[in-house]
Amino acid sequence: MPSRRQFIQLTAGAALAAQGTHQAMAQSEKKRTIVDTQVHLWKAESPDWKWVPGRKPQLPEPFTIEKLVPLMDEAGVDRVVVVPPSWPGDRNDYALEAAKRYPNRFGVMGRIALEKPESAALLPKWKEQPGMLGIRLTFQREQVAMLQHADWIFPAAEKAGVPLMFFAPDNLPRFATIAEKHPGLALIIDHMGLTAEIAKEGRTKSAIDEVVKLAKYPNVSVKVSAAGTFSQEAYPFRDTAEHIKRCFDAYGPQRSYWGTDMTNSLAKATYRQRIEQFTKELSFLSEEDKDWVMGKAILKRLNWA
């Protein structure tokens, strides 16, 4: 039996060890880099910044750089991939302004006019634009027609080393051939291939099936993003957990990326809650998995230093 002095020493040692463990865990959490893989930014409509006819913003008020930065600071988000929205058309100027003003916090997956022959000449120097990380393609609703103009971009982007994020719900099978034909092209599936309509129609499982099929191609990865948009429940969006897990199991931690697309479901959860859905609510993610999914993986995939 230890003496009183030994007991005090042992107790003090245990307390110090526990304190050290707690500090180490806190330090680990602090060191985790949080990168949101999709946020739209836009300013007010004006004569030189007009909406495309028939399109409208996701919110009644502009979602500006000045609004986003304090939200990032409050939630603990280190960086954001800015995806220019569709309603101002194929322009990247405001997103690039964010990257210019905050070069260590914002990067841009820009828009490009697929139907314009002159766009091909932009690819070789695309990433020379300060803050530009790659291109985001949208093939949804009326934009599905753009697929007929898209054949040129896949070899061009592969040659130029430009990653492509693509939103192509109900059109993912087309990308199997593209992934196989262009193994050096980084292809990133947006939002698990889902839309709010797919979720409401009960087609989520079959949509995820198509996402999982593409996992066999090493150059394909997935944004497990926008959970708030697809959930039919309140936070923490437990009905999305099985779909996130299926994508994660197929792609692994280094090819799965957290993101919010939060202007599509702004009222459903705080920015911090959207982080904690992954860091606290998804029991299948280890701490190391979270490091990759919450930031390390997308930084590596986009070569974003």
Image: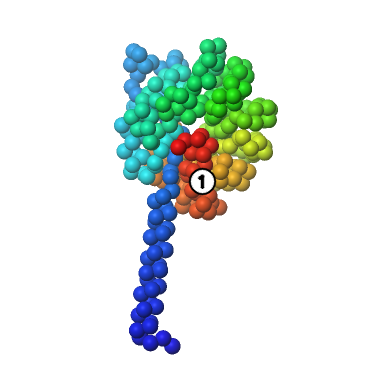
Q: In which quarter of the image is the N terminus?
A: bottom left
Decide if residue 87 is in sight here. Answer: no
**Residue 248: horizontal and vertical position, in percent?**
58, 45
Q: Which of 302 and 52 is in front in this view?
A: 302
Residue lying at 37% horizontally and 71% vertically, measured from the top left: 15
- In x, y percent, where is residue 220? 61, 35
Report how many numbered discs are placed on residues in the image.
Answer: 1
Q: Which residue lies furthest to the top in this view?
A: 117
Quadrant containing the C terminus in the rendered view: top left
As drawn, 292 above or below 148: below
Q: Which residue is drawn at 51% across and 26% down?
A: 135
Q: In the rendered image, which residue does mark 1 sit on? A: 292
Location of residue 104 in the rendering, given as x and y in whole percent from the top left corner = 38, 36
Quadrant assignment, res 167? top right
Q: Which of 264 and 190 is in front in this view?
A: 190
Residue 82: name its quadrant. top left
Amino acid type assigned to the residue bearing label 1 in the image = Trp
Looking at the picture, tell me which residue is in the foreground, 293 or 9: 9
Q: Does the image show residue 146?
A: yes
Say whether residue 27 is left or right of residue 288: left
Viewer-proximal residue among 98 and 62 = 98
- Residue at left 65%, top 28%? 182
Residue 180 is situated, as x and y percent measured from the top left of the image, at 68, 30
SS at mark 1? helix
The residue drawn where x is 39% and y is 51% is 30
Q: How crowded is mark 1: few (under 14 residues within 10 Å), some or many (20 or more)?
A: many
Q: Which colour scheme is used?
A: rainbow
